[in-house]
Image (spheres, coloured by chain):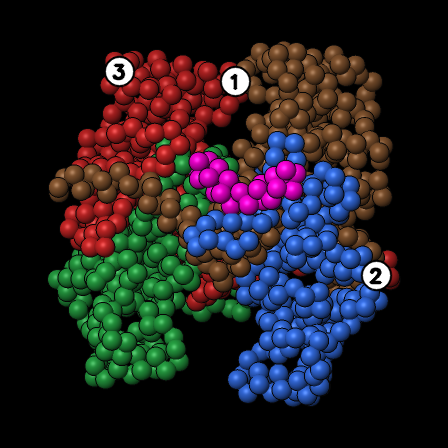
Chain colours: A blue, B brown, C green, D red
């Protein structure tokens, strides 16, 4: 049933006094006790329940994104909690605000590269040639090739081969995975550097295999990291570091101003 | 090993070039492909892996909190996306900012009530008497009893009995569940109204059975809702409602000002 | 004094027990009672105090951005306040999150267009020719020309001529103002439409006259709108609309789902 | 004209194609070029234009709150900018999220204390006796007395006497200022410590003199700090510190985990 112009319409959920329906499933009888949190996330992203194979692969990529340690995002969340401990949700929100182009965005860029190069995964294409074309094009426009190499996890980001292994084991070693891997090989040749697929590239490829559009890929990172940020707030509650960081940063960053005044008055 | 005063310390995660360790588990060998997203959330909240029984129960309460339809929080996220579609993370963050005392907070208040009334779940207590005391105390201080009754899901919030059934089926029908249910019964007597345990109360009780401290309970809501908010952003991408809502709200809310001007100039 | 690599350094502010120094000015003796809030904002954006002429012009553009009525951003803030009234700061934050590419971003884009076209405002350039080139270039790349036309304030956005008048009255009718106006004229010819400079374009031009780099221009909108959002929270405290909006949106947007169920059960 | 139940109504602003009206004032003819940013903020908070005396005093308290250096809030904003430089508004939002009970909240608490003790500033009360009662009451309930003492600005927070001087010079040394000062004197006696009024207490008292309700006082801090946070983002753009902070925090906080592994493998 098409929506009339200007009509508000949502197909996500509705409630009756005695029931709650989410994407056509009854929360009480169809979902609770049957769906895990990861499968519920899959339902939010696709409007359908995952098959067991999809569930295994989707949960693996989502789990990869939960915890990255003391990221700028985690530090922002802890700093925020220090000022507003009564509003934990705002601390998580502050942490999420930084999941932009620099960190989580690269996953989106990689997925976009793959999906724009190969709009139809069932098309009969020469993946090697396509990869060569993608790399040549990005190289000629002096753009970074997303999803390959890692400044710290060298020579190989250990998450990538494991994610590909999980995907492959469940039948998801399809064209996007092959394309991503071929892009890395072509990039290594072009740049004469070791540039294997990293976690970002593996997730972008596998999410594309799961038919998730690139525009929503960042959302997997956002939901996963919200989980990790709650973990950081929990640690900050028990063993806080925000004030100590603040004191050190302030003391060091303004030392030259204090010094200048002493000289002036000395 | 205790931390020296002023030393920064986090026990959550660390990375080597060839490995990532989260709470003592190797991400690649111990976690990926083995832990679901919900179990990863449990690890973040408890520093250990859930047993299968814990996993089933924890996933059920987390899943309950993912999707509540067009809440103020979901509308805030959609409004934010309309202005900054390039920053989906900020839209989810905006949605999370509203998970405060009014909605998610009641879960925290209920868990606090239970855990403060019964600090040691192994203590030998008369749950009926304790419930009576809790209700009498809150009633005398004219405070709302959290976790019971529902303005819309009447007479019974269908999520509560289902959650209790799942918990019970996995051996979690312990003292906090009994206390919550007894509190509802005493409240019904005191207020002479039908006030069964609602989803909030059931989750508070079951999370207490899982030994989750009340201070972190809101975090389950925050992480779960982040998942649901990504779902709302996804729908807003395809079938937007933010601008229409804005136009209608503005037109209606300022109609009296327009009218006043016409009269003045008429 | 150059910063050593990796050294933290901030030149903004430092405190002694008996004084606070901000950008070299003593807060107590130099700033309080002498600087208005707008001039303090100018100090934050430029590291120096405004001249009276700069103050007049800067305050005018900042004031223009404070209040735009029931924008998506204001509605997001109100929705957030409804859920977390104990955390007003998070409601304002939620409102700010939406000041992205769609609304406040156009000001940034216009300022960038002007400053990239004319990097040195003292250069001896033919403004008409430059404007023609800018319009032709954007037109050929099928890009929107920022800062001109308005979907509602037709034929002329009344803020633009008033802002130009204020700027001109204080000696700021320089090359960026001329360029912006010439761009509008060329665009009107190219598109054969009435496309006068709008508020966004006027602010971009005047901010460029004040030598504010385009990268920080969005910040004027962010700080100004924070003020306006506090005004909306204040009204929401006294005369709330969030819950009513939520109820209406939910009822209308999910009506088709309710209907579907009735048919199914009917 | 009263609002009908359920009707949406806002008295803030409305637009016609050729005009914008804010709180009854025409933006173009009454506001632009006539109101400074601080006076516009006063209009948002009170629905009327300030008198020159009100303007001077209000601008002084707002300016006091703009810049507090490298606060947790400023660090959170910088961390967020490092991850999402394309969304400066989200970085400011992240910074605002931490303006809760710990920092900005104390101003609210102090204003509430004053306004609840003295609901009618024109009432004929014995301020000394009232102050004694307020202190005795908070002392007996083991509550902190807000607005007095300072952990760093000792023995006197230099902002407080200056703010009182400005207020007094404009005729705002009324009952709330007297009450705040008397509370400090009584607290000093009760606790046998030097506890002069601090900036927070002075602002709370002066804002109360301006008839600003305590519920909105936090908003002055929120709007002022938004201005300061834009200043921090501007510095972070040119001379970033976020990554360096992140690297140091991570290295130190996880050193014991790295060490543990070395021992284990050694």
| Above or below for C247 versus A109 | above
The crowding category of the residue bearing disc 3, from other C-alpha atoms within 10 Å (few below 14, some 14 to 19, many at least 20), is: few
Quarter assignment of residue B254: top left
Closer to us: D215 or D259 = D215
**B220 is higher (above) or lower (below) than A253:** above
Q: Say yes or no: labels 2 and 3 on the same chain.
A: no
Q: Label 2, secondary structure: give it.
A: helix
- In the image, taking residue A187 as reference, residue C196 lies left or right, namely left
Is there a contact, CB below 8 Å, between mark 1 and mark 3? no
Q: Which residue is mark 2?
A: B29
Q: Splitting the image into 4 quarters, where does residue C190 fall?
A: bottom left
Q: Which residue is disc 1 drawn over?
A: D141
What chain is tagged by disc 3? D
Q: Which residue is mark 3?
A: D123
What's the magenta bit mostly, secondary-structure-wise? helix
Q: CA distance from mark 2 to mark 1?
A: 54 Å
């Amino acid at each position: 049933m098409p929506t009339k112009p200007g009509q508000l319409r949502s197909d996500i959920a509705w409630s009756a006094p005695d029931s709650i329906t989410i994407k056509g499933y009854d929360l009480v009888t169809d979902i609770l006790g049957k769906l895990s949190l990861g499968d519920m996330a899959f339902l939010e992203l696709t409007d359908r329940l995952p098959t067991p194979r999809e569930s295994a692969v989707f949960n693996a990529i989502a789990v990869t994104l939960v915890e990255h340690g003391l990221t700028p995002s985690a530090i922002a969340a802890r700093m925020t909690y220090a000022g507003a401990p009564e509003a934990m949700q705002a601390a998580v929100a502050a942490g999420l605000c930084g999941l932009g182009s620099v960190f989580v965005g690269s996953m989106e860029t990689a997925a976009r590269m793959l999906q724009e190069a190969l709009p139809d995964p069932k098309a009969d294409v020469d993946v090697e040639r396509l990869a060569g074309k993608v790399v040549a094009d990005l190289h000629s426009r002096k753009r970074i090739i997303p999803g390959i190499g890692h400044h710290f996890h060298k020579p190989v980001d250990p998450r990538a081969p494991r994610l590909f292994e999980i995907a492959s084991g469940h039948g998801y070693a399809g064209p996007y995975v092959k394309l991503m891997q071929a892009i890395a090989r072509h990039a290594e040749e072009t740049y004469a550097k070791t540039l294997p697929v990293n976690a970002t590239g593996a997730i972008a490829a596998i999410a594309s295999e799961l038919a998730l559009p690139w525009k929503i890929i960042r959302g997997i990172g956002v939901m996963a990291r919200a989980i990790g940020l709650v973990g950081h707030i929990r640690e900050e509650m028990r063993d806080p570091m925000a004030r100590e960081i603040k004191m050190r940063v302030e003391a060091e960053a303004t030392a030259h101003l204090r010094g200048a005044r002493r000289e002036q008055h000395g």
